[in-house]
Amino acid sequence: MTPICFPKLTRAAAALALTLLGNPSLAEPSHGIAMYGDPTLPHDFVSLPYANPTAPKGGRIVTGNGGSFDSLNPFVRKGTVPWQLRFFAYESLMGRNFDEPFSLYGLLAESIETPADRSWVEFTLREEARFSDGAPVTVDDVIWSYETLGTIGHPRYLGFWKKVETIEATGPRSLRITFNTDDRELALIAGLRPILQKAQFEGKAFEDITLQEAPIGTAPYVVSDFEAGRYVTLSRNKDYWGKDLPFRQGTQNFDEIKIDFFGDASVMFEAFKAGEISYVREFNAEKWASNYNFPLAQSGDIIKSEIPHQKPSGITGLVLNTRRAPLDDIRVRDALMHVFNFEFINDTMTGGRQPRISSYFSGSQLAMEDGPATGRVQELLMPFKDTLPPEAFSGYSLPESNGSVRNRANLRKAMSLMEAAGWTVVDGKMQNASGEVLALEILLSQGDTENKAITDIYSKALEALGVDVTITLVDGPQYKQRTGTFDFDITNYRRAISLSPGNEQRLYWGSEAASQDGSRNWMGVQSPAIDAMIDEMLTSESRENFFAATKALDRVLTTGRYVIPIWTYAVGRVAHHQDLHFPESLPIYGDGVEWLPGVWWHEE
């Protein structure tokens, strides 16, 4: 090996450069962090841009949930929990600004520090941070929360913990997390983990906490009352530690949030019409146009507000469980997609008012483009060319019908695809070479009237193809148990996607998640191409490469025919009491639980 000799005059400069490159301590503490570049808000920001810092405090808001609940611990797999709890009653080290794709600002932590390669992240806690019982938030609480959630918590927390090499205190109010993998998003994900109180669980199992013992949090709201299966009431903590933080100005304005539970969506809507619920979100454009002419709406006591956003469509529709034959055959899945007569169903259900989801990231700059894959997208897909559908490269669009109930052209195409997969119609029944009739079960939750109406139409078309179809309705706990163990052929599916998709993509459709009970990979897809595109997204150092990786992922998912998509929710629709108000400035993410009720207020 030939030694490298530096000229005398440059040797000191070279040594300094090597020191700088190898010295991770050069990272500087900051008030915030962005996935790419710098966070938009300055260190001295007054409030979030979509909050009204002068909004009055007070009043009460009532929302409705379908189903029931038997637990108040949202951090374990066991039990059914009001989904709002982890947003209303718990906080993390950092808080998210929903007017940026992915930027965080100090909440329980006063600062964040990470090097350019984001191989570690360090947080410094605010000295004033407190739990709702008045106890200070300590570094020990934080470390215990990360380890507990990452080892015995809900599956949504397990993936992050596997990427943690070490977590250790670096001072009385500071801790550092070092990662074992190259993933730029991990520093941000670390800032969003909920922080719980270690002392509450001394001498008891974290997962066995009783219904009467909600985990203690640090957020503005605490559970003040509940009746199992019927309602939960959260009250604003008058001693909330963070009420003066800029991040909290104009947020969490209601004195009380009550969550009522209804077994049926129609019963919940009747309660809203009677004024018993403060607001509802409407996802059906036809109902939005025709069902809101009841007396309270006619008198002006109920107002309809439409909220635009810039989010990707995500995927909503019927998911096909590829763990079960013959749904593991893409030709069969393609046939089932052709049988689904979207144009007729959309006209019947929404009056044709809602456009169809065309891909997982449709409606955003992250979506796959029409036509053949080109440039960096093609380059990323090429190593997997032999394993991907040809349309991933040539281009793909969903089957379309002429809107008539018969859908003859697509039924003929479906029949051709089934025959290619080894299925033929004998005596009116779709059979394989062994004479087995193709029978599919569509699993739905009781009270899911919209998906029941969709599948009633769809099942008739499947029966015309010779398929035996059973629609099974189960209660909420049974639905959760069956979907959590992937005990279904087809069921309704919804995965929202942000403007900065990241590690959650592994939970939605990563190979490892396919075999984990309770994961969100309901379709059971195990694809090296999908895993590689997610890896590329997570390690991209430029926004341009990140966009290319996301567009490539969109192609693989869409052409894989894992979900039969329905309509997109391109605008949020909220009907609410006239005494509820929101700021004129809207976040790019539009409606969501952090916006409603997050920044709304009550004023007569």
Image (cartoon, rainbow, N blue to C red):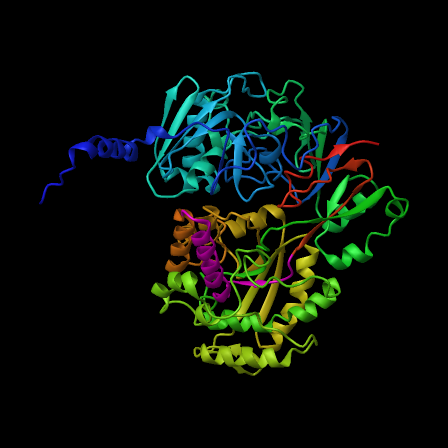
Which quadrant of the figure contains the N terminus? top left
Residue 203 visible in image: no
Q: Position of residue 172 (x, y in %)?
A: 41, 17
Dominant secondary structure (helix, strand or loop) of the stretch shown in magenta: helix
Q: Is residue 566 magenta?
A: yes
Which image quadrant for residue 122? top left
Which quadrant of the figure contains the C terminus? top right
Residue 110 visible in image: yes
Looking at this view, name the residue that lies furthest to the left: 1
Residue nearest the observer in this picture, 171 or 44: 44
The residue lying at 50 percent from left, 37 percent from top is 76
Q: Is residue 78 magenta?
A: no
Q: Is residue 302 above or below residue 239?
A: below
Residue nearest the observer in this picture, 82 or 433: 82
> In the image, is 374 to the left or to the right of 61?
left
Which image quadrant for residue 173? top left
Count of numbered circles on the image:
0
Q: Position of residue 228 (x, y in %)?
A: 66, 34
> In the image, is 116 to the left or to the right of 487?
left
Which image quadrant for residue 412? bottom right
Q: Is residue 49 above or below residue 296?
A: above
Looking at this view, name the residue that lies furthest to the bottom: 427
Q: Is residue 594 above or below residue 110?
A: below
> In the image, is 309 to the left or to the right of 518?
right
Q: Position of residue 177 (x, y in %)?
A: 38, 31
Q: Position of residue 424 (x, y in %)?
A: 50, 81
Numbered range of the magenta stretch = 541-568
> In the image, is 273 to the left or to the right of 394?
right
